Amino acid sequence: MAEYDNTNSGVLFANQYKEQGDSRPDFVGNINVDGNQFKLAGWKNVSQGGKRYISVKVSEDTQEGQQEQKKQSEEELPF
């Protein structure tokens, strides 16, 4: 079986460490852009017009971050 090609795709998970009222992101994950790994963070917001949206931030990923994200995603698999 060939390994999955995740180039130009990403994933966000609900942040299990988020607590009510803190500034940590509501969602965390990673994205691969042209073979480069980046970390993603997302916050739930409401516009002045009342529309809900998610603002995102992209930052460089470190080797430790990649390993931690892989561990977290494997723990969430139902099988």
Image: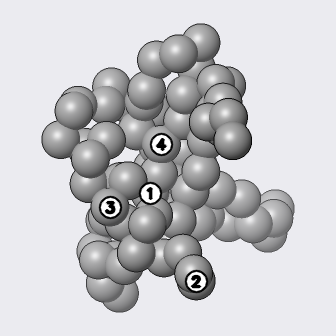
What SS does tag 4 mark? strand
Q: Earlier in the sequence, mark 1 or mark 2?
A: 1
Give the Cα distance between marks 1 and 2: 19 Å
| Sequence order check, earlier mark of 4 and 2 | 4
- Whether the residues at callouts 2 and 3 have beta carbons within 8 Å, the answer is no
The residue beneath circle 2 is 78
Mark pair 3, 4: CA separation = 13 Å
The residue located at (31%, 41%) in the rendering is 66
Q: Which residue is mark 3?
A: 71
Report which residue position mark 1 lands on: 28
Residue at screen point 54% across, 44% down: 56
Task: From the image, state whether disc 1 or disc 4 is nearer to you.
Answer: 4
Q: Nearer the viewer, mark 3 or mark 4?
A: 3
**SS at circle 2:** loop
- Mark nearest the camera among 1 and 2 is 2
**52 or 7, which is in the foreground?**
7
Left or right of 50 in this view: 43: left
Q: Which residue is situated farthest in the front direction here?
A: 1
Question: Residue 61: horizontal and vertical position, in percent?
Answer: 31, 31
Please say if the residues under marks 4 and 2 sit with CB atoms less than 8 Å apart: no
The quadrant where residue 63 appears: top left
Q: Amino acid at mark 3?
A: Lys
Left or right: 72 with respect to 51? left
Name the spot of residue 21 as percent of width and height, x first: 33, 81
Q: Position of residue 29 (x, y in %)?
A: 47, 51
The kind of residue tagged 1 is Val
